[in-house]
Amino acid sequence: MVDDTLDEAEEIRKRKLEEMKKRAQEEQGRESQRQNEEIQKQALLRNLLTPEARERLGRVKIARPEYGSQVENLIIQLAQQGRIKQKIDEPALVGLLKQIQGQVKKDFNIHRI
C-alpha cells in the first residue's frame, strides 16, 4: 500500500516534470521565433531607411516605444504593398511620425461646472 502511494507520487512527479520540460521547450521555440522575426525586421528596415532615418527612428523608439513600433510596422506594410520606391530619409520619417501621432492623438474637452 505504501509502495503504491510512492509509485503514484513518483508518477505524478514525472508527469509534472515532463509538462514543465515541454512548456520550457515551447517557450524557447517562441522566443527563438520572435528573435528571428526581429532580425528580419531590422534587416528590412536597414534596406528601407537612410542611416539618418534609422538613427532618428532609434531615438523615437527610446522616447516613445509605441510610436517607434507603429512606424516600423507602417514602413514594412508600405514596403510589402510596393509603395516605397526609394529609401526613406529623415524628413519622410518625420512625416510618417506626424501621421501616426495624428491617428493616436485624442481630443478631450474640459467643462467647468
Image (cartoon, helix red, strand yellow):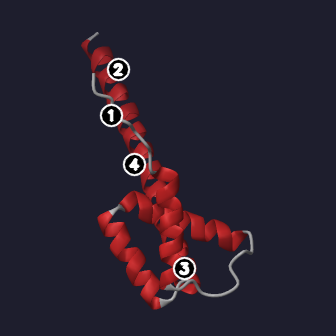
Which mark sits nearer the N-terminus, 1 or 2? 2
The residue identified by callout 3 is: 92
The residue identified by callout 4 is: 24
Local packing at callout 2 (Cα closer than 10 Å; few below 14, some 14-19, many 20+) is few
Residue type for callout 4: Ala
Q: Nearer the viewer, mark 2 or mark 4?
A: 4
The quarter holding residue 16 reads top left
Q: Which residue sits at x=50%, y=82%? A: 91
Which mark sits nearer the N-terminus, 4 or 1? 4
Across and down, in percent, residue 112 comes to: 28, 27
* Quadrant where the N terminus is found in the figure: top left
The residue identified by callout 1 is: 110
Across and down, in percent, residue 15 comes to: 40, 32
Residue type for callout 2: Glu
Identify whether 50 is placed above or below 79.
below
Of 60 and 34, nearer the camera is 60
